[in-house]
Amino acid sequence: MFSTRTSWVRDENALSARAAEMKGDPELVDLTVSNPTIVGIERSQGLLSALSDRRALAYGPDPLGLAEARDAVAAYYARRNVHVDPARIVLTSTTSEAYAFLFQLLLERGAHVAAPTPSYPLFSFLADLAGVEIRHYELLRGERWTLDSSTLADAQAVIVVSPNNPTGSVLAPGERSEILAHARRSGASVIADEVFLDYLAEPKRFAATTFVKEQKSLTFTLSGLSKVAGLPQMKLSWIVVSGPDEDAGEALSRLTIIADTFLSVSTPVQLAAPAFLEDAEAFQDRLRARLAVNRRALPPNALTGDGGWYAIIPLDPDADDEAFALDLLERQRVLVHPGYFFDLIDPAIVVSLLPQERVFAATMRRMFGG
Ligand SMILES: Cc1ncc(COP(=O)(O)O)c(C=O)c1O
């Protein structure tokens, strides 16, 4: 009755079962939190009034997104000294939906898409749903995360996550050129996931790092309000299309039909996009200050890469990261992700840097002393 694409193994592991039992425990410290709306970051008064624009009473959809919302995304890039033509912007409800659109646009069933490992486990589900196959290329842990270019296999699309989740790493210029050259040789497009790009430890690197300026290969750069403005509940993301004019034009024309088939972005959020994206600047200042404080509270062996919302804490080489996480939950009521969740090879745990500073510092002291 059901498709094989959705025949996922759904057994709960011991850690998630125990975490579910302890949900609601006031003493539980959740260091897996990725939801920026529940970690006590102050929001501007009146922010929601942007949703009560009376123009939202009328429905006049544009498949790629309303002009003022796409202009607001272009203005967001302009504040970062990056020029983006609003005509090259496609709005989607989430970044996950953007991936789904791009897989439909670029990949035949059974085609290969290259994606980094370690990384966020979202891709395998998106690939299953699109009936395509992931070919992982490896990032190797060292003083910084480096690309193992010998693992780059042919694929029809190459995903780059910049900064990557959870390593926080950004490709070095040489590695980036290598990936782009490899993509060109195999006729692949590039999908650059930049949802965390505003959270580089050195925010000024945004303009030099973003893929929206990539002109040689057809490139799709993804981001959205979820991380940029800390508003995942608003459901507004975008794709910036760059590359050779002819390819970009064809991509936009086909994306128009894909987006028109769903018309998934609501009118109120599009009309509110200018206000939400302007407010994102104050939100990011607050969050960046918190991330910096929490990074300083980490044990000295923690890895934070170039930025992002997470840190990796290596364990002893013979440790079992799931057993460690389970023991931590039982004894100290602290929930962390074991590294294997992100396909980290060496034993490690992954902690979110979003929790309030006092809670985070006290938890680090409890876990690692000092
Ligand atoms: C690297 C990365 N890309 C995309 C997403 C999904 O973002 P959205 O909420 O816009 O679908 C996440 C969510 O955590 C993520 O970590």
Image (spheres, rainbow, N blue to C red):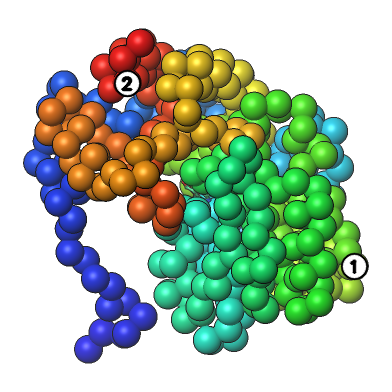
Q: Check disc 2 and report its element: helix, strand or loop.
A: helix
Q: Residue furthest front?
A: 318
Q: CA distance from mark 1 to mark 2?
A: 54 Å
User: On the rendered image, what quadrant is the C terminus found in?
Assistant: top left
Residue 184 at x, y percent in the picture: 81, 72
Which residue is painted at 47% across and 28% down in the image? 301
**Any atom of ligand 1 within 8 Å of the CB at mark 2?**
no
Residue 193 or residue 321, whichever sits in front: 321
- Which-is-in-front pick, marks 1 and 2? 2
Which residue is painted at 21% across and 66% down in the image? 10
The amino acid at mark 1 is Asp
Residue that carries the numbered disc 2 in the rendered image: 368
The amino acid at mark 2 is Phe
Q: Does 228 sit above or below residue 321?
A: above
Horizontal arrangement in the rendering, residue 236 relative to residue 80 (left or right): left
Which disc number belongs to residue 262?
none
Q: Is residue 286 visible?
A: no
Residue 51 at x, y percent in the picture: 51, 34
Q: Does 228 sit above or below residue 156?
A: above
Residue that carries the numbered disc 1 in the rendered image: 245
Q: Does 365 sit above or below residue 119?
A: above
Q: Is residue 133 visible?
A: yes
Q: Earlier in the sequence, mark 1 or mark 2?
A: 1
